[in-house]
Amino acid sequence: MLTPQRKKAILEKLATDGQVLSKALSEWLDVSEDTVRRDLRELSAQGLLQRVHGGAVPAADAKVTFSERQSLRMDSKMRVAKKGAELIAPGQVVIIDGGTTTAELIKFLPIDLRITVVTHSPSIALGLVEHPLIEVILIGGKLYKHSIVTVGAAALEGITQYHADIFFMGVTGVHPEAGLTTGDYEEACIKRALSKRAAETIVLASAEKINAASPFVIGDLSLMNTLVVEDDTDAALRAALASAGVSIVNA
């Protein structure tokens, strides 16, 4: 089998199974594990998969620009965002992460909702300007322009000042083996820190994030308490979530 054919077969199997293992691929394709690892390296360099220990999982679109992500699977993002907004109760302190899905979340907040929102996203803060009863606290720091959020030491220090009821965490991938991931190291650190400051962490996972992974690990599935997904979410992921003690809310 020629290299292009082999790579095509690997991607097809990955799409079907949600994960591939180097050893199993070498036996299936009748080639050495070194050959398989080389194929996986090259496919990873093209952004077609995400390598993990022992194999690979589907790659999330972590490096797509913010403006491009705003038009990606908007129907799915709106559904999970609308359901997520229903989980907020009056009087709560709510941490809202940056991202295109959380940008949709705030659009579904009732105009008479009285809460306090803590965010490190200038976009989220500006999006709440017209909500008269929502108090907004903006965490400062170095602006990471790709995601339009603040990161760095100042942001980490600011995060320690709060005890929130809920944290809506943005991720680029939710995978049974790879866990919760994102495309930037500093963002992953900030997300972990924010999760520690909330009684409950909620992830809004639109369709393109399911069974996908990015290079930087935020934490395993148990880091979140609740995952909001669409009804047709993969059964294997649901089983993994249940074993990790995560509640699933269908949008």
Image (cartoon, grey):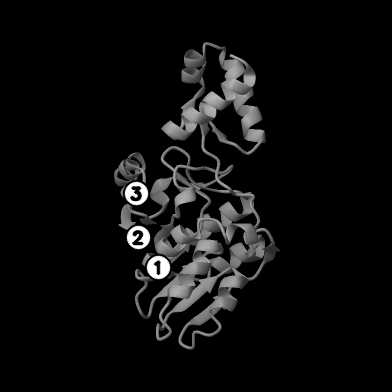
Measured Cα–Cα span from mark 3 to mark 1: 17 Å
Quadrant in which residue 40 is drawn:
top right
Q: Position of residue 74 (x, y in %)?
A: 50, 60
Measured Cα–Cα span from mark 2 to mark 3: 10 Å
Estimate how packed mark 3 is, as few (under 14), some (14 to 19) or many (20 or more) residues with alpha carbons within 10 Å. Answer: few
Query: Are discs 2 and 1 less than 8 Å apart at CB?
Result: yes
| Mark identifier at residue 251 | 2
Nearer to us in this view, 4 or 88: 4
Determine which residue is flagged by label 1: 82
Looking at marks 2 and 1 on the same chain, the residue that comes earlier in the sequence is marked by: 1
Q: How many marks?
A: 3
In the image, 98: left or right of 227?
right
Looking at marks 2 and 3 on the same chain, the residue that comes earlier in the sequence is marked by: 3
Image height check: is 51 above or below 228? Answer: above
Image height check: is 68 above or below 126? Answer: above
Image height check: is 7 above or below 189? Answer: above
Q: Position of residue 56 (x, y in %)?
A: 52, 31
Q: Which circle, 3 or 1, is nearer the viewer?
A: 3
